[in-house]
Amino acid sequence: MEPDTDAPTSFTALQAAIAQRQNSLSPRLRQIAEYALSNPNDMALETVAQIAERAGVQPSALIRFSKTLGFDGFTEMQRVFRTRLTDNMPNYKERIRALTDGGPALSDASRVLEHFIDAGINALEHLRQELTATDLDRALDLLEGAEHIYVMGQRRSFPVAAYLGYALGRLGRRTVLLDGLGGMLRQQVQAIGDRDLLVAISFKPYSEDTVEICRLAADNGVPVLGITDGTLSPIMPLAGVTLAVEDAQVKGFRSLTATMCMAVSLIVGLGQRLDKEKASR
Amino acid sequence: MEPDTDAPTSFTALQAAIAQRQNSLSPRLRQIAEYALSNPNDMALETVAQIAERAGVQPSALIRFSKTLGFDGFTEMQRVFRTRLTDNMPNYKERIRALTDGGPALSDASRVLEHFIDAGINALEHLRQELTATDLDRALDLLEGAEHIYVMGQRRSFPVAAYLGYALGRLGRRTVLLDGLGGMLRQQVQAIGDRDLLVAISFKPYSEDTVEICRLAADNGVPVLGITDGTLSPIMPLAGVTLAVEDAQVKGFRSLTATMCMAVSLIVGLGQRLDKEKASR
DNA sequence: AAGCGCTTAGAATAAATGTTCCCACCGCTG
DNA sequence: CAGCGGTGGGAACATTTATTCTAAGCGCTT
């Protein structure tokens, strides 16, 4: 028996197919249809036995249900239910990479821009999903409470550090941008106390200087706010609070699109807090 | 043996646990850690064998990895990865509503971030529409042909200038970042010749210094590439080529999201040209 | 260089899961 | 009321999948 060709391949198509046949189904199968439509998560993740029990049917009924819809078996139908999870919660990292490394060779400049715009949008969506409110709030707590704020970022991360340094200063926070100018980095760092804050920005490949400064600070009890990429950053274990950003990437070139977006959000969020604080006094 | 008590129960906790132990893990387990953090979808849905193959490890290594983190086995850890899919799923639609309704679910800080993400996406879409291929190509012509490239941006534009300065240098272009350190700005500018290029970045409210430097350069016949906002920018009439970017803006606070995206596109576009040029010789 | 501990690969094993199949049931029709 | 087609239940089966285990490998120290 060859596999039916009318088996839906997308979740929405499956949803429609179930809804449509609901009337022509036998009672028990309709019971399953109802359960499937209202508990798609279970359909995607649980085992046949589990679903059968929760829906109050026999496991074999689920198989029959799947075959009625044109699938080979339950497993095949479950795969479609799972696409819903991955489609609505996409792994943006993969998508970004697919856009770029897998894509055709970028020919002219505007194609490059197109790619970075697409990758940037994905990175922003990814940021929306992965950055939790509590992390943000904890970051703002640190920024709000620190007597002095020291900002460090090297190479590609320096622009972010420069922006934060500039903007924090404009908000009236005492801010020092650790630029290591004239080889004064160590001296600048020694001045940091445990009531201050070190904001460390570093992405792969991580600047050794930044990591070492973080370690120094952490050893001295200085709170550290890390802005870094989530995957195995050496900053993360050293920082009290970490804001993880996976920025857009095309052909190995990383953008600062999403990182800058988060940075400005931090600034404005902090500004709001300071306004409130001032107003309450 | 009783089950370990330190096994994370939420995805974020698991994420943190993995990131934290990265240093103390053996090479193969670290390899898994990296894969797990960048492919949480696979970890949630695929089988041990599948994940092992994709990550390039043995199935048994995945079990060892799980046990290292305090789980009884892989299955138990996978359950945590699956919570991420189900937990974030219903929020997806709710979140947007929460944003518009101003619901109390989101803290102020994450609301700000949501706004900037939305505004950033809009700005990127806008950039896609407004920036023409010819402008980009002409900008690249300038960057490619210049003997020396001088980059200038102040205040909020400085991070962009810093990025361009850094990235152009990495591409092998002779680049000077006009930072005005030690009040040497005028002297630095006098060195610019008509075979060089001045890249001037400035947004409303336009830095007087930047505008003046542009004027100086234009008077001396130095080509100027302007990166600015389109509306009535004083840079535009002074620059031979202008790249106009309207960046995201929330309550008067401007982001650098789109500008950075364009900057990195310029860099990569230039890099491609240089590669071609090198290859053809 | 030998021995030790930790790590790893890969096959063997155990567990679970999906699937099949057969019989009982029910309502309908002749 | 007997026969029939469709439906459902549940145990048996086969397959997939997780897990364990042992021997080999590697890097250190002695």
Image (tube, coloured by chain):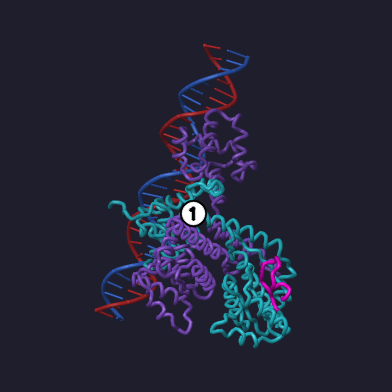
Chain colours: A purple, B cyan, C blue, D red
**Closer to us: B245 or A23:** B245
- Which of the 4 image quadrants contains residue A106? bottom right
**Closer to us: A56 or B245:** B245
Q: Is residue B53 left or right of residue B251?
A: left
Please, what secondary structure does the residue beneath circle 1 have? Answer: helix
Q: Is residue C1 left or right of residue B154?
A: left
Q: Which residues are magenta?
A: B224-238
- Which of the 4 image quadrants contains residue C12? bottom left
On the image, the x and y values in percent for residue B219 come to 73, 83
Residue found 61% across the figure and 43% down from its top: A12
Q: Residues within 10 Å of mark 1 (few under 14, many from 20)?
A: some
Q: Which residue is mark 1?
A: B108
Dot 1 falls on which chain? B
Residue found 62% across the figure and 38% down from its top: A17
The total of numbered circles placed on residues is 1
Q: Which residue is most to the right?
A: B134
On the image, the x and y values in percent for residue B224 come to 70, 78
Say whether residue B227 is magenta.
yes
**Closer to us: A157 or A163:** A163
The image quadrant where one finds the C terminus of chain B is bottom right
**Closer to us: A160 or C16:** A160
The answer to whether residue B22 is visible is: no
